[in-house]
Image (tube, rainbow, N blue to C red):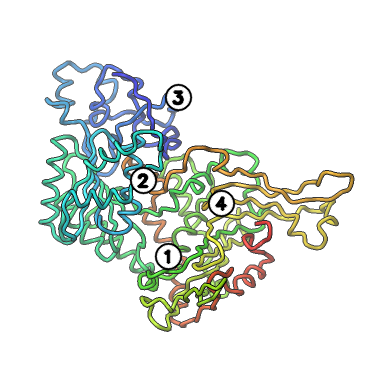
Amino acid sequence: MALSVAKCPSSSAAARLAPDHSPPRWSTLLRPFPRTVLAGSVAVPSSKNWNLGVACKQEVGTVAASSPKEAPSKNVEIGGLLGLSSEEYRDVIGPNSSEREPTVSITVVGASGDLAKKKIFPALFALYYEDCLPKHFTIFGYARSKMTDAELRTMVSKTLTCRIDKRENCNEKMEQFLQRCFYHSGQYESEENFADLDKELKEHEGGRLSNRLFYLSIPPNIFIDVVKSASKSASSKNGWTRVIVEKPFGRDSESSAALTRGLKQYLDEDQIFRIDHYLGKELVENLSILRFSNLVFEPLWSRQYIRNVQLIFSEDFGTEGRGGYFDNYGIIRDIMQNHLLQILALFAMETPVSLDAEDIRNEKVKVLRSMKPLQLENVVIGQYRSHTKGGVAYPGYTDDKTVPKGSLTPTFAAAALFIDNARWDGVPFLMKAGKALETRRTEIRVQFRHVPGNLYKRSFGTDLDRATNELVIRVQPDEAIYLKINNKIPGLGMRLDRSNLNLLYASRYSKEIPDAYERLLLDAIEGERRLFIRSDELDAAWELFTPLLKELEEKKIAPELYPYGSCGPAGAHYLAANYNVRWGDTASDA
């Protein structure tokens, strides 16, 4: 068997080389045996002590999953396999070894929707282009709309781009990819329609070991109908079946728990992949690497040196016709309870035992459960109003025809959160999220404490905040990590300046950063769960925000109005000032 080196830089490579419950890539070690044996028939020892130096191209989806509903395999130890007779060997791999060769069938449920067209299909094509999908794979679109295979391919082709590598045969790869795409029309609650889908999937799987991934790109109110039908009529009989679920995961603790109970009637927890695409962003994944692999940062990562942490999300556009959907959730549910809170948990967690998914998620849950209840006095909400700027009139939130008149749904929120543990006691974690603001950005800002007895404080005058070191992790756009430091301006005098030690990704790395959906789809296919949300994480997140949301809605608290294109309501600045903090994104040298 020739050694095949991976072209694909899998996002979860670090986790696969570090301690993991998945079998190691034995293809570099067991040359005499077919890959199919390694894929589905051999139970190998734990990889906890392995750190293989050779990167081998893996047939994605061949790793036996841990879920009871996933692929059964014969439990044959490596030592036993080496001593098998030819007859015993055939018994292990089956009379026709090609039948054990795996295939992955990816069904995008809700294929005619915007998310599928703009994100999921382009991400799957990018993975195909980079040779990250297995040799045998099929993609099916499933929706209620009537459509032929050709019409699906035409629809999908409009959103595929050759942005990955314009120098190579992208158009040819695009055509090859589209030939793997098919369409099946059916009702979401129909077991009969999913049984018909199952027949089509089997035709394309050709008797191979079948692994199936369902991506639910649909409203949450029909999640359970689809999962019930797919589980009963279209799940794999000899491989794994996994389901990716898009947010929102409910509106509060009660609805989220009901959704989880409904999903678990038909799926095990290990089969459910709750996706938060922000966890797939390059700079979010780099967060733990920055902290745990750089000695200069880890000793400073506590209340002794950090004065406050800011998690900032801003968009420079409003709901733009999506107000009807947004009005049912608001900015707290849409951004703070999931995206920003997940980033906070990753930032603040203790060092996990390993890079295993469960070890990391255990530490995140500890952070969420250690958080103090959110108090109304530590929250500011706002809503953008119409504003004219540069001769252009921008509409207010309630000017959107899809938004109910007099809506009190916040389009902006700021909150001060606290973690009640030894590492973070007393450190304010300030969250801010809003639409129709001055700029578009997502960033983490870590403001360190003032230098005790600073010898140069006279050079900064009375504003000691100017002398404060600040670490900024810019998630988007223009991904970067920079550290603000104080230095002397060249010359005979003693004049100080504040400068940035800057890692700007576009300057440092020529390769384009993959879209978050590419990383998360690949991880789901490979069974890597680090970047997906476990049910107890979800419960802890809702337990933190549900009391606040109920209080805001029951008391009908009116949001503070702010002009479209401004830096948000003034109340957010007063909230920060209560803790002697300034928002870092509003500074002149941000």
Question: Which residue in the protein does label 3 denote?
Answer: 53
Q: SS for tag 2?
A: loop
Left or right of residue 516, residue 476 in this image: right
- The furthest residue to the right: 492
Q: Residue at x 46, y 40 (%)?
A: 355
Distance between the alpha carbons at the discs numbered 3 and 4: 32 Å
Tell me which amino acid carries mark 4.
Answer: Arg
Q: Position of residue 276 (x, y in %)?
A: 40, 54
- The furthest residue to the front: 391
Distance between the alpha carbons at the discs numbered 4 and 1: 20 Å
Distance between the alpha carbons at the discs numbered 2 and 1: 29 Å
Circle number at residue 161: 2
Tell me which amino acid carries mark 3.
Answer: Gly
Q: SS for tag 3?
A: loop
Q: Position of residue 579 (x, y in %)?
A: 66, 67
Q: SS for tag 1?
A: helix
Distance between the alpha carbons at the discs numbered 2 and 3: 34 Å
Circle number at residue 459: none
Circle number at residue 334: 1
Q: SS for tag 4?
A: strand
Distance between the alpha carbons at the discs numbered 4 and 2: 26 Å
Circle number at residue 474: 4
Tell me which amino acid carries mark 2.
Answer: Thr
Tell me which amino acid carries mark 1.
Answer: Asp
